[in-house]
Amino acid sequence: MKPALPMLLACACLASAGCDLSRTPTFDDKHVLHGDVAQGRALVANGRFGCAACHAIPGVDSPKGVAGPPLHGMASRAFIAGQLPNKPDVLVGFLRDPPAFVASTGMPNVGLTAGQARDIAAYLYTLEGVNEP
Ligand code: HEC
């Protein structure tokens, strides 16, 4: 009779909406589905989108611009742009089209594809500490 209880729990769980036995997403879940960290870092570093022209970004060389906030500690911030919940889907969306999320934002739409935004978000979520160079 041992397997009966887990089976029962699984059935009850499957019957309730939004229940996933294998994984419990939390506010701190910073995993970006299909995001490629190395690719994201390369996209930020190659200068094509001007990220580093406006932001100081750990792991990416100058110009370490100051038009936007430094991006260290993105993994541990509670908010994006001071007001959006810092969750993977929100970050990806914001990166693709910041004014669509925060009308008054100083960050322009730099023309990222969905895939590029996911890769960059995955990279940004590797930035933990506030004291990174
Ligand atoms: C023209 C300057 C500019 C460019 C280019 C730019 N940003 Fe920004 N970015 C900003 C500004 C200004 C803000 C602050 C937005 C706000 O608070 O409304 C911002 C905010 C952000 C935030 C939220 C940070 C936080 O603390 O909430 C992230 C993440 C970000 N930018 C990433 C990027 C990435 C990645 C790129 C390149 C793909 C990029 N930015 C390109 C100016 C820029």
Image (cartoon, grey):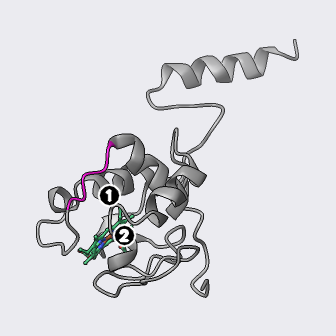
Spatial distance from mark 2 to mark 1, Cα to Cα?
A: 10 Å
Query: Is residue 111 found inside the magenta-colored segment of the image?
Result: yes
Picture mark count: 2
- The answer to whether residue 49 is above or below residue 5 is below
Query: Is residue 12 found inside the magenta-colored segment of the image?
Result: no
Provide the residue designation for mark 1. Answer: 95
Q: On the picture, is 58 further left or further right than 90?
A: right
Give the quarter of the figure containing the C terminus.
bottom right
Q: Is mark 1 within 8 Å of ligand 1?
A: yes
Q: Residue at x 34, y 77 (%)?
A: 53
In the rendering, at what x and y percent does residue 113 appear?
32, 43
The residue segment tinted magenta is: 109-113
In the rendering, at what x and y percent does residue 14 appear?
54, 20
- The answer to whether residue 78 is above or below residue 68 is above
Q: Tag 1's secondary structure?
A: helix
| Ligand number 1: quarter of image | bottom left
Kind of residue indicated by mark 2: Cys
Q: Residue at x 38, y 79 (%)?
A: 55
Q: Tag 2's secondary structure?
A: helix
Q: On the picture, is 57 further left or further right than 11?
A: left
Q: On the picture, is 23 further left or further right than 88?
A: right
Residue sitting farthest toward the left:
103
